[in-house]
Amino acid sequence: VQLQASGGGLVQAGGSLRLSCAASGRTFNVVTAGWFRQAPGKEREFVAGISWRGDSTRYTDSVNGRFTISRDNAKNTVYLQMNSLKPEDTAVYYCAARPYGTIVTAPGSYDYWGQGTQVTVSS
């Protein structure tokens, strides 16, 4: 599975962005997908994950209620809708995927990674 993330940019606090992760490869519709982020000087952290059917999601506490992960398997794409953005959301955002299994938060549990897209939220 190859992943290509897009949709990042510069936005003011309180604004919104939607990230997209386009996948290629025949097994995308059976992978668990996730979004991670990494701010300068910090470790990569889990943001949100979605099961392969799209019927189960998980969020880190700091984005719960503001971010929404979704997927369209017909389009081989996973989305991250980010609302009410805060300066502390500034980071490079990565999409990732792992074959089957549950949604997990450890980056090392994901086999496939996109190249990252920069999100900058100004105060």
Image: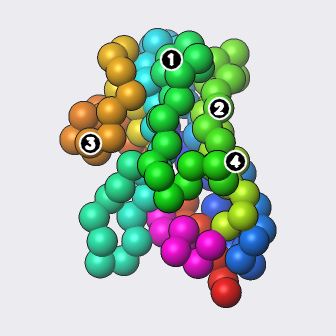
**Residue situated in front as seen by the camera: 39 or 68:** 68
Q: Is residue 55 magenta?
A: no
Q: Which residues are magenta?
A: 86-92
* Rendering coords of residue 100 (x, y %): 36, 15
Is label 2 in a helix, a strand or a loop?
A: strand
* Rendering coords of residue 94 (x, y %): 46, 51
Mark 3 crowd level (few <14, some 14–19, many ≥20, 10 Å Cα):
few
* Rendering coords of residue 22 (x, y %): 60, 35
Q: Earlier in the sequence, mark 3 or mark 2?
A: 2
- The amino acid pointed to by label 2 is Ser
Judging by the rendered image, the residue that carries numbered circle 3 is 106
Residue 24 located left or right of residue 67: left
Q: Is residue 87 magenta?
A: yes
Answer yes or no: do the residues labelled 2 and 4 have beta carbons within 8 Å? yes
- What residue lies at 58% left-to-right and 17% top-to-bottom? 55
Judging by the rendered image, the residue that carries numbered circle 4 is 81
- What residue lies at 50% left-to-right and 17% top-to-bottom? 52
- The amino acid pointed to by label 1 is Trp
- The amino acid pointed to by label 3 is Ala
Q: Earlier in the sequence, mark 2 or mark 4?
A: 2
Answer yes or no: do the residues labelled 3 and 2 have beta carbons within 8 Å? no
The answer to whether residue 113 is above or below residue 55 is: below
Q: Is residue 2 visible?
A: no
- What residue lies at 39% left-to-right and 28% top-to-bottom? 103
Judging by the rendered image, the residue that carries numbered circle 2 is 70
Q: Earlier in the sequence, mark 4 or mark 3?
A: 4
Judging by the rendered image, the residue that carries numbered circle 1 is 52
Q: Distance of mark 4 from mark 1, alpha carbons?
A: 18 Å
Q: Distance of mark 2 from mark 4, alpha carbons?
A: 8 Å
User: Furthest-right residue in view?
Assistant: 15
Name the image quarter holding residue 23. top right
* Rendering coords of residue 70 (x, y %): 65, 32
